[in-house]
Every structure is written in structure tokens, then in C-alpha cells.
Amino acid sequence: MTIEEQPISSEQMYRIEDNGYSIFGMKKLLMMENAGHGLADFILSEKGPDLNGKKIISFCGTGNNGGDAMVASRHLSGYNGVDVTIVLLGNIKNIKTEETRVNWSIVGKMKSIKILSGTNVLELAKEQVSNSNIIIDGIFGTGIKGKIREPFSSAIDLINNSDTYVVAVDIPSGLDPTDGTFHEKCVKADATVTFHRIKNGLNGKKEYTGKVHLEKIGIPIEAEQGVV
């Protein structure tokens, strides 16, 4: 195994991202754009190139994982005949980062994307899921901590009870990125698109991750110095 192939922890990834920004000036909004674009390209390579008539549902949490899924949804919505819906889980006021807020603002202005949010969002999403072809799991990323609360818990159940092709963003929601365990439940993905480096918790968990695809997002390799 080469140094580039060695998996890292979520804490190491945070430090690498911070180094990319603070030392090299690579904005985190650009990292998110590259991640979401790479995710969209992966979906096209697996389920395209013709998306005409396909229905894509993105389940987005309020963190950067949700922001990545929003970016991917924006890119995918530009293809002829595709139907894209974003399901926001959580309060809009609780969106955690500036990068995700920017992308939420963008998709909210787009007529080509249907937005579902609010207290009854899962009821609205059920019919969408039953007719969907692709689900993007952007609920939790590597920062998951503690008990899985509502509406996230029921959203994971809804995804797992569907017969739809599921792509997880960075790591399946509910899976611990450090050791690959989960406390209650976890999305069972057909594929996982992870960014910059493989995370420790993805190894040996194919029943949850499905096919694992590594997507580089432009962070300078020098940002790893002193971290890896």
C-alpha cells in the first residue's frame, strides 16, 4: 500500500481541509463544488449517460454532507429529462456552514429542482422515493456523533426500505468513519463516493458502502504535511 492509498480518520481529513484553506488559500466552497461535481460525474458514469426520465432524490442534512449533495443535484438537474428533488432534513435556520448555506440559496432559486422541507418533509418524500431511480444519501458525513434523532432516523429507514439505487456522500449515514461501527442504524448504499482519501471506517464494510469510489477534490497534497 502506497502512502496515497492509506486510509485516514475524519479528524485527519478536517485538518487537511483546514490546511488547504489556511495555508494554500483553497476556499472550502471550492472543495464542496469539486466534491459535488465529482459525485454527479460518478452517478453519470454508473447510471447514465442518458438520464432522460430518471428521478433522483437527494436527502440532505444541514451540514457539509448535505451541501455536497446539493451541488451534485444542481449539476444533475442540467441533463435533459431528469427529475431532481432535494429533501432537506432539519431546520433551514440550522444549516451549519457558509458553504452549505450558499448552495442551499442557489438550489432554492432553481425551478429545475423540487425542494421538500418543513415538519412533514418525510411524508412528502415517501411518494417521491417510491417512484425514484436514484437516491443520494447526504444526511450525515464524517462528523456524525451521538444518537440518530428524527427526522434523520426515519429517513434512513425510508432509504433502506426502498428498492432504489443509493449513492452515499463520503460515508453512508450512520456509519462511524473511524471504526466502521454504528450504534443504531446505517444507510445501506450501493455505492459510496468518498473524497480526497479513503476513510478508515469504509474498509471491510461493503454490505453498507457498496462500491467505494475515491474522488479527488483539488486539495494540494502538501496540505497533508504533518497530518498523515
Image: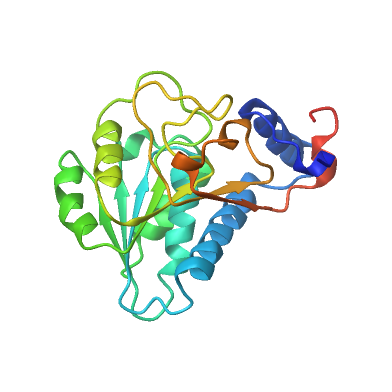
Is residue 138 in view?
yes
- Residue in view at x 50 percent, y 27 percent: 176
- Asked where in the image residue 146 lies, by quadrant, the reply is top left
Give the camera-side residue of 79 and 210.
210
Q: Say whether residue 48 is left or right of residue 186.
A: right
- Asked where in the image residue 109 lies, by quadrant, the reply is bottom left
Q: Say whether residue 15 is left or right of residue 208.
A: right
Q: How is the image coloured?
A: rainbow
- Asked where in the image residue 177 lies, by quadrant, the reply is top right
Residue 78 vertical position relative to residue 33 in the rendered view, above or below: below
Q: Say whether residue 169 is left or right of residue 35.
A: left
How many numbered marks are there?
Answer: 0
Is residue 102 in view?
no
Residue 45 vertical position relative to residue 154 in the rendered view, above or below: below
- Residue in view at x 29 percent, y 25 percent: 149
**Split into 4 quadrants, where in the image is the C terminus?**
top right
Where is residue 81? Give x, y as percent.
33, 79
Give the camera-side residue of 182 and 73.
182
- Residue in view at x 46 percent, y 47 percent: 168
**Split into 4 quadrants, where in the image is the N terminus?**
top right
- Residue in view at x 71 percent, y 30 percent: 15
Residue 32 vertical position relative to residue 81 in the rendered view, above or below: above
Where is residue 82? Give x, y as percent.
34, 74
Where is residue 123? Give x, y as percent.
14, 46
Give the camera-side residue of 219 and 147.
147
